[in-house]
Amino acid sequence: MSENFYQAPQSEEGIAQQFAIAGDFIQLQPPAHLPSACVKCGNQEALEGENTTLVYINPWHFLWILISPLILIIMYFIFRKTIKVDFYRCGECADKNRFWRNMALGGLLATIAAIVGLVALEDAFAPYFALAAGVLVIFSLVAQTRRFHGL
């Protein structure tokens, strides 16, 4: 049986804990420092430290867009919750993250190039550039979600 690195620590009176387990969730106290293990695979060797800011907003707040996008933006900045988190990835998982980040960026740049081609070239080629731009946008979005799959 392997050791669970994210098991809730034993509480000691008078000492604040970094994180606690509440059901299926990890509750973090700022500044959050996760244990020295890869967050994706649990490997403890060849770790690369990363830090990021996690942002949460209740999904119900997105209904404000029905009234106005400006109100949605204002409510987003009022009600969002952020926390800075330090965590680790092993070399293999970090390489996969870099690969998908580069694929998403490349897809975005290719989409921009396809849109420029759509505008600049004659009408005969417009459907092809529009199709290419649509496919590249979808590819970029998929690559971006693959980057964050499993954090």
Image: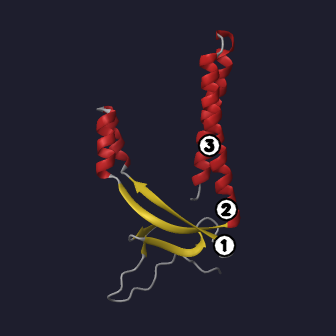
**Reading the chain from its start, which is encountered first: label 2 or label 1?**
1
Which of the image's four quarters has the N terminus? bottom right
Vertical side of 70 occupied by 14: above or below: below
Considering every residue shown, the one lying at the far bottom of the view is 13
Does residue 5 sit above or below 147 in this rendering?
below
Residue 29 at x, y percent in the picture: 38, 71
Q: What kind of element bears circle 3?
A: helix
The quadrant of the rendering that contains the C terminus is bottom right
Q: Residues within 10 Å of mark 2 (few under 14, many from 20)?
A: many
Residue 149, percent across and down?
A: 59, 54
Q: Earlier in the sequence, mark 3 or mark 1?
A: 1
Number of the label disc, if any, that sits on residue 43: 1
Quote the CA–CA distance across marks 2 and 1.
10 Å
User: Which residue in the structure is indicated by mark 2?
Assistant: 93
Quadrant of the rendered structure where residue 142 is?
top right
63 or 131, nearer to the observer: 131
Q: Residues within 10 Å of mark 3 (few under 14, many from 20)?
A: some
Pointer 3 with pointer 2, Cβ within 8 A: no
| Residue behind mark 3 | 105
**Residue placed at 65% from the left, 23% from the top?**
131
Question: Local crowd at mark 1 within 10 Å, few (<14), some, or many (≥20)?
Answer: some
Q: Which mark is residue 142?
A: none
Asked whether the beta carbons under mark 2 and mark 1 sit within 8 Å of each other, the answer is yes
User: Which comes sooner in the sequence, label 3 or label 2?
Assistant: 2
| Depicted 109 relative to depicted 52: above or below | above
Residue 68, given in percent of the width and then of the height, sits at 30, 32
Q: Is residue 135 rendered to the left or right of residue 56? A: right
Kind of residue sitting beneath label 1: Asn
Say which residue appears at 64% left-offset and 79% top-offset.
2
| Label 1 element class | loop
